[in-house]
Image (tube, grey):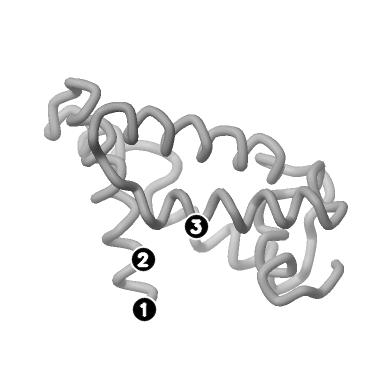
Amino acid sequence: MLMGLEMQAPAETVTMGEGLGIQRSELLGIVRGGGFSAPVMGFKSTRMAARRYLEPDFPPRLMAKDLRVAVQAASENGRDLAMAAAAGVAHDRARGNGLADLDCAAIADALNGSQP
């Protein structure tokens, strides 16, 4: 499942980007060289394990907004970002459950209905 999700994220990034006229090679170069490539899972999983969500790197309220913008932009260009849409729903749920200003790693708690 994890590998599938890891592959889905750059795939949806490419899908959205190409729909907006951005070259695939440019997008994937950014993915490979950016801070949100696979190493992010290391430091976010550490936060999730310790439930250390204060002093956020990026809060769910902003993640939800960014995901909504991405899904809307893709939709306007005839593209479907199913995982981004689902992730947006989950981040909206986190925001609604009082986790809006914590770190986005708190999504782990929002998905299972617990509070950090």
Please identify the quarter of the rendering in which residue 76 is found. top left
Say what secondary structure mark 2 lies in.
helix
| Screen quadrant of the C terminus | bottom right
How crowded pointer 2 is (Cα within 10 Å; few <14, some 14-19, many 20+) is rated as few
Q: Horizontal placement of 48 versus 71: left or right? A: right
Residue for point 37% across, 49% down: 37
Marks 3 and 1 in Cβ contact (< 8 Å): no
Spatial separation of the CA atoms under disc 2 and disc 3:
12 Å
Q: How many numbered marks are there?
A: 3
Can I make out residue 32 in this image? no
Residue for point 21% across, 29% down: 19
Q: What residue did someone put label 2 on?
A: 5
Could you say where residue 101 lies in the image, as x and y percent from the top left?
81, 42
Q: What residue did someone put label 3 on?
A: 86
| Screen quadrant of the N terminus | bottom left
Please identify the quarter of the rendering in which residue 28 is found. top left
Could you say where residue 48 lies in the image, as x and y percent from the top left?
68, 67
Q: Earlier in the sequence, mark 3 or mark 1?
A: 1
Say what secondary structure mark 1 lies in.
loop
Q: What residue did someone put label 1 on?
A: 1
Marks 2 and 3 in Cβ contact (< 8 Å): no
Q: Amino acid at mark 1?
A: Met
Q: Horizontal placement of 68 versus 75: left or right? A: right
